[in-house]
Image (tube, rainbow, N blue to C red):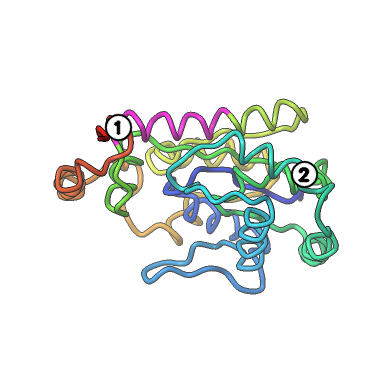
Amino acid sequence: MRNVIVLTSGLSGSSVLTSLIARAGYWTGATTVKKPSYDTFENAELVRANLRIIEEAGYEGNYVEEFSWDALQRIGALPSRVDLAPYRAFVAKCDMHRPWIWKDPRLWLTIRFWSELLDLDACRFILLTRGHLQTWVSSTLHRRITTYRYAKAYEESIRASILQFLADRRLAHLEMRYEDLIGRPAETIDALNRFIGTELSVAHLESVYTKPLYRNPRPSSVDFVKAVLIYLKNFNERKDAPAKPTG
């Protein structure tokens, strides 16, 4: 089996997808990043490396809310300017545990850097997206205050940048929607199996996803109301707000 790299913007259900794929024997790392209520299945060393890459590129923007072509260009040019030894060592460590799976929302920023170090022919790429409303609700509950229009543009810009990366390098990829994985699991898992060469089943998904399947995972009415109230309370601080007058 080839290694798997999940590319996403974050808050997209990628922890569920990665935990599912890990059931097929993919290595997620010696340690993974854990949140209070769940395991993200993000290789902790990968996360630290991605943070170092962003720092070495000199990018100080808020990448969880702001899309930046400048950041992508800086990071893409970084391999010719930094010591690659620690990054090569990390890739070699992962290759000792093949097949491995990488998942970290920062990969949309750093994948162009890693592409210079990876055997891309030994990797399969999955682009995971989620409905714009659900993403806006989740980001607002995380206190990222943006208009729906801004959040949608952010998500679509990241998706476009990922697709451009894949097209430029002619890399095979599978685009998945989180809603399809949960709402149409049998069909979606079948497509996943054909793409990465696994034999995963709905039973494997049920072992990692505790909520009901075969339902579109829309935001609950409670979460939607909470998000709207948080948004209204912080309305003047929202992204996409008109510039405040000066003088």
Which quadrant of the figure has residue 241? top left
Q: In front here: 11 or 55?
A: 55
Q: Position of residue 212 (x, y in %)?
A: 31, 51
Q: Dot 2: what SS?
A: loop
Q: Residue at x 63, y 42 (%)?
A: 193
- Above or below for 207 versus 139: below
Q: Dot 1: what SS?
A: loop
Which quadrant of the figure has residue 31? bottom right
The residue beneath circle 2 is 115
- Above or below for 110 versus 56: above
In the image, which residues are magenta?
A: 147-160
**Marks 1 & 2, CB-CB < 8 Å contact:** no
33 left or right of 235? right
- Looking at the rendered image, the disc whose residue lies closer to the viewer, 1 or 2, is 1
Give the residue type that dot 2 points to: Ser
Can you name the residue that lies furthest to the front here? 247
Quarter of the image with the C terminus in it:
top left
In space, the residues marked 1 and 2 are separated at their CA atoms by 38 Å
Residue 159 among magenta residues: yes
Give the residue type that dot 1 points to: Ala
The residue beneath circle 1 is 243
Disc number for residue 114: none
Main SS of residues in magenta:
helix
Q: Residue at x 66, y 55 (%)?
A: 101
Residue 66 among magenta residues: no
Please state the total of marks drawn on the protein image.
Answer: 2
Q: Residue at x 85, y 63 (%)?
A: 85
Q: Position of residue 103 (x, y in %)?
A: 59, 54
- Above or below for 193 versus 30: above
